[in-house]
Image: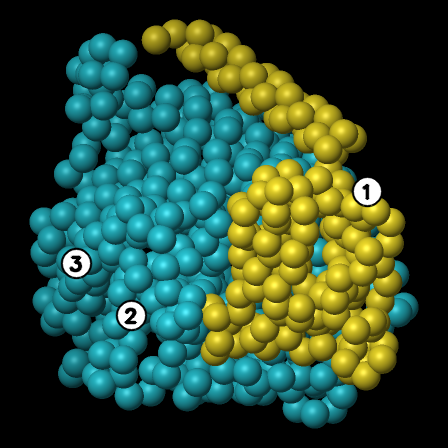
Amino acid sequence: MNKHVIEAYERGWTYFSLLMILVFLVFIGYTLSGYAFYVPDAARRIDPTTVRTGGFPEPGVEEVAPGKYQVYVIGQAFTWLPSEMRFKVGDEVTFFVTSPDVQHGFYIHGTNINVQVIPGEVAKVKTIFKRPGEYLVICNEYCGIGHQNMIGRIVVEE
Amino acid sequence: MATLARKDAYADFPVKKVSLYFITLGFLALSIGTLFGPFQALNYANINLYPWLQKILPFVKSYYQGLTLHGVLNAIVFTQLFAQGALLYLQSKEMKLLPQMGMAWVAWWLAFVGLVLAAIPLLMDDATVLYTFYPPLKGHPLFYIGAALIIVSSLLSVYLSAELWYRWKKQNPGKPTPLVSYMSVVTWMMWGVAAIGLVVEAVVLLIPWSLGLLKGVDPLLARTLFWWTGHPIVYFWLLPAYVVWYGILPKRTGGKLISDPLARLVFLAFLIFSSPVGFHHQFADPGIDPFWKLVHTVLTMMVAVPSLITAFTVAASLELGAREAGGRGVLGWIKKLNWRDPVVLASTLGAISFIVGGAGGIVNASFTLDYVVHNTTWIPGHFHLPVATAVTLTHIGLAAVLIPHLTGKPLVGLKYLRAGIVLWFAGMMIMAVGMHTMGLLGVPRRAWISNLAPNLEGIYASSAIWMVLNGIAGVILFVAAILIFYPLFATLLQGKRLPPEERPEIEFTEAISGPEGRRSVMVMDRLFFWWATALVIVLVVYMPTLIRIWSTFVSAPGFRLW
């Protein structure tokens, strides 16, 4: 094959690669602008040694308006507090999550709620439960010898 | 007399000896780290062999300890030591100059002492913090000190490579840097910028904290510094394999590189875009502004471009060689590749795995998609393709030629090695299918799921079929590891040496379009300028976030929870 032909192919592929990356970036921008309320936000910084002594609200579900909930979650070795939550389909739920000890991962199984729980940060993330059923809350960041057993539950009813 | 004979073997070019020491120490680490791999694969097949393993190796206390050893020895120690040995030798050979030999040995000893120091708490279950060692999980100080010494050793390699290059440029004014040396020095310069995050994390935060001099560390600050280094470290693993794919592989199949300047541009792009991308590991982190996450996303996507170019260029070079050798047809030429050569076999299979791995990497880098896969088994499923397959196989293939070349000892058991390479590739691909799919089904990574509490049994039942693939892959990879490590170590340990004229030579690829007379090549050769540019870009994309976190420093005390 002629040298100039190969070099032309190589140039063409380079431009195609750039174009492909550009298209991906457009998709990312589009999803970010419209759908990505599941991107975790930082509510505030917190001294992790105060999480269990009044620096953070009592873990639990709080109804702030009809169908709107705020949930305060503590991830600690090796449980979630509260360990079980109940919602109805269509409820809009805002989670505030923090840790008093080491890092954990707040992952609601089968959804894109996937938040790094970092001591020192209160993570804020919002979702609307659309499908009824039982969801596991899986710790997906290594937190010690019992990490695999750090599983909570969310029940979503019709 | 034996000592005298050994001296003679390296007298012609003493850098051979220090490179061999780096490579051998690297493979020792890899062989120990790899031992734990099948146990992890079986864990994800819901088979818990750790109680049994503990009977043979009483110091192994948990899956998490095995996983820490596996990650640290394979991903951090082996990759770095191999790069230190192989790149130093290839650059010295191409430039026909010796590096500063005293400094090279200091680098080796630092890495060796660091490895021993870190290994003690790792083996004693006192640093079961995984290879990301996120605080506030707190390991034994020796672990952090040992790891820091290993990094310092790598920084000496940055100096050795840059100094060698600078000396060559002084002796050859106006000439473009030879290609393999260019790639080597750019790789080290990239690492010089990338390593800053980890150095600061270890020296300013982790070591004083583990020694009790600092009450607490800021976990988000430590994470952010970790990922400053943690993503480009992947390119630090990968680029030495690219050096082989560009600089050695085409030559061994009778092919040529299409364009030398484009190969340089690829490496230069890595120098600039490798480091300012770490936030794509922190999409799930609160406390980092989404604006900066988006900036890192764009830069991460840019760093995919040089890899895409590499996929084309390396494949085209192989095709050129195979067609020269009489290959015909759209894909028929593939049969004409010199598959019997371990370099060709291992590098090509590695590169194929990298195509899949690269595609998965683009998913991970996509801001809004990442939440589906973050910290699921998708992630280790992904990085076992570029790192454990592409890089590791390429290094194994090169070692099969490099060890005989450096020592003069003939390769033992080539057919075992070839079988091992093929099985390694097959095992990794099977495991990747299993782990990627399980990740999409929501199975968390780094979890001892074969040891769940009784009330949780069956929570991952929807992944049962894919778990079987992990089990099969674990067994295949165990066999592959034996077939690979036996020939490499048997070659090293034998007493026999070939006469100089029979030793395998390592030759570098030529290009159809060379670097001579190109202005672009001379611009790309101004490496100190590009190095400074890379540093400035990293500072720009990191400083606003780091300063903000640092100014509200949260002091988190440490925990030992394993």
| Front residue of B244 and B7 | B244
Q: Residue at x 61, y 47 (%)?
A: A157
- The chain letter corresponding to cyan is B
Q: Is residue A24 above or below residue B405?
A: above
Query: Residue A133: percent from the left, percent from the top?
Result: 54, 47
Residue B411 falls in which quadrant of the image? bottom left
Q: Secondary structure at mark 3?
A: helix
Which numbered dot is residue B479? 3
User: What's the amino acid at mark 1?
Assistant: Phe
* Mark 1 or 2, nearer chain start: 2
* Mark 3 or 2, nearer chain start: 2
Q: Which residue is mark 1?
A: B291
Q: Residue at x 44, y 40 (%)?
A: B357
Could you tell me how far apart the alpha carbons at marks 3 and 2 are, in whole angstroms? Answer: 19 Å
User: Which colour assignment does the render follow?
Assistant: by chain
Q: Chain of mark 2?
A: B
* Mark 3 or 1, nearer chain start: 1
Could you tell me how far apart the alpha carbons at marks 3 and 1 are, in whole angstroms? Answer: 47 Å
Q: Nearer the viewer, mark 3 or mark 1?
A: 1
Number of residues whose C-alpha sits closer than 10 Å to that of mark 2, classed few (under 14), some (14–19) or many (20 or more): some
Q: Chain of mark 3?
A: B
Q: Which residue is mark 2?
A: B48
